[in-house]
Image (spheres, helix red, strand yellow):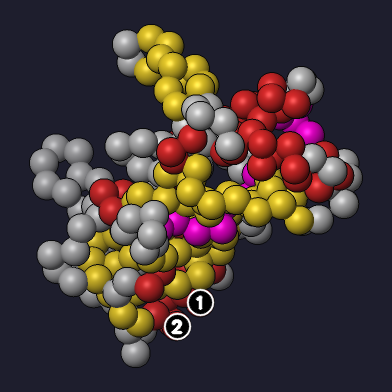
């Protein structure tokens, strides 16, 4: 059976990298008695994959993983069992049965919803006082950033991949392209906007939080959490 789980990653756990998170979940599932399906061969491993690795330091309430299991109890019971062995900062939010032929969450992702806020200013004046400047920033013909690639540094225009933005006292909210084809990190937007303002960007001052991951196109995004069925 294919299971998709949504989980949250908050608090100090945000400083744990993706590979360590993968290992942690494998151990947590074993402690919780999850009947995982393993690969064949000399070095069997759980059939487990994550939708989109989260950068170190970023918090989230919309992370997803796919797990193949042999047997399972109800969604409610499984969420309680797994959360009972999880460390503070990691929490399973949903546990759903997917069709046998369902595509992996990783292959479906096309967008992500982020919030960026100033950890030193609850009113986020750097964004609210520059709301008009941000509109000017988005009206540019192109927004070029230099992105590292396997073949070396590459200039790309990120403007077509910034789908939706909003500035409030909570910070800068943005929906951007995410996935294997075009992956726009919120840091790209921040760095280029601060450069537009003529201000140095201090990555340690601003917290990035991911709300959710989407599939579909920019005009019809669907949360991955709407897919599958709860097990009763």
Task: Describe residue 172's horizontal placement relative to residue 29 as left or right.
Answer: right
In the image, 181 versus 135, the foreground residue is 135
Mark 2 burial class by Cα count in 10 Å: few <14, some 14-19, many 20+: some
Residue drawn at 60 percent across, 51 percent down: 165
- Relative height, residue 65 to residue 140 (above, below): below
- Do labels 1 and 2 touch, CB within 8 Å? yes
Residue drawn at 66 percent across, 42 percent down: 135
Which image quarter is the C terminus in? bottom left
Which image quarter is the N terminus in? bottom left
Residue 212 falls inside the magenta stretch: yes
For label 1, the residue is 80
- Relative height, residue 92 to residue 74 (above, below): above
Q: CA distance from mark 1 to mark 2?
A: 6 Å
Residue 13 is at least partly visible in this image: no
Disc 2, SS: helix
Residue 215, image x and y in percent? 34, 58
Residue drawn at 39 percent across, 80 percent down: 75
Disc 1, SS: helix
Task: Describe residue 149's horizontal placement relative to residue 136 as left or right.
Answer: left
Residue 64, image x and y in percent? 41, 57
Residue drawn at 65 percent across, 54 percent down: 166
Q: Magenta span covers which residues?
A: 202-215
- Relative height, residue 119 to residue 65 (above, below): above
- Residue 102: numbered disc: none
For label 2, the residue is 76
């Amino acid at each position: 059976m294919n299971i998709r789980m949504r989980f949250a990653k908050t608090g100090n756990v945000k400083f744990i990298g993706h590979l360590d998170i993968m290992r942690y979940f494998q151990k947590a599932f074993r402690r919780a008695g999850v009947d995982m399906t393993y690969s064949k061969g000399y070095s069997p491993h759980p059939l487990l994959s994550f939708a989109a690795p989260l950068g170190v330091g970023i918090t989230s309430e919309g992370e997803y993983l796919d797990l193949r299991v042999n047997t399972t109890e109800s969604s409610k019971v499984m969420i309680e069992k797994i959360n009972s062995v999880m460390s503070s900062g990691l929490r399973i939010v949903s546990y759903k049965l997917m069709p046998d032929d369902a595509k992996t969450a990783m292959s479906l992702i096309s967008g992500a919803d982020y919030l960026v806020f100033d950890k030193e200013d609850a009113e986020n004046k750097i964004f609210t006082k520059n709301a008009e400047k941000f509109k000017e920033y988005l009206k540019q013909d192109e927004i070029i950033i230099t992105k590292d690639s396997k073949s070396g540094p590459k200039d790309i225009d990120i403007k077509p991949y910034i789908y939706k933005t909003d500035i409030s006292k909570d910070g800068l909210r943005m929906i951007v392209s995410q996935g294997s084809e075009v992956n726009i990190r919120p840091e790209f937007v921040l760095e280029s906007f601060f450069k537009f303002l003529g201000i140095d960007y201090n990555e340690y001052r601003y917290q990035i939080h991911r709300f959710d991951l989407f599939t579909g196109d920019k005009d019809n995004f669907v949360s991955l959490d709407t897919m599958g069925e709860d097990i009763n």
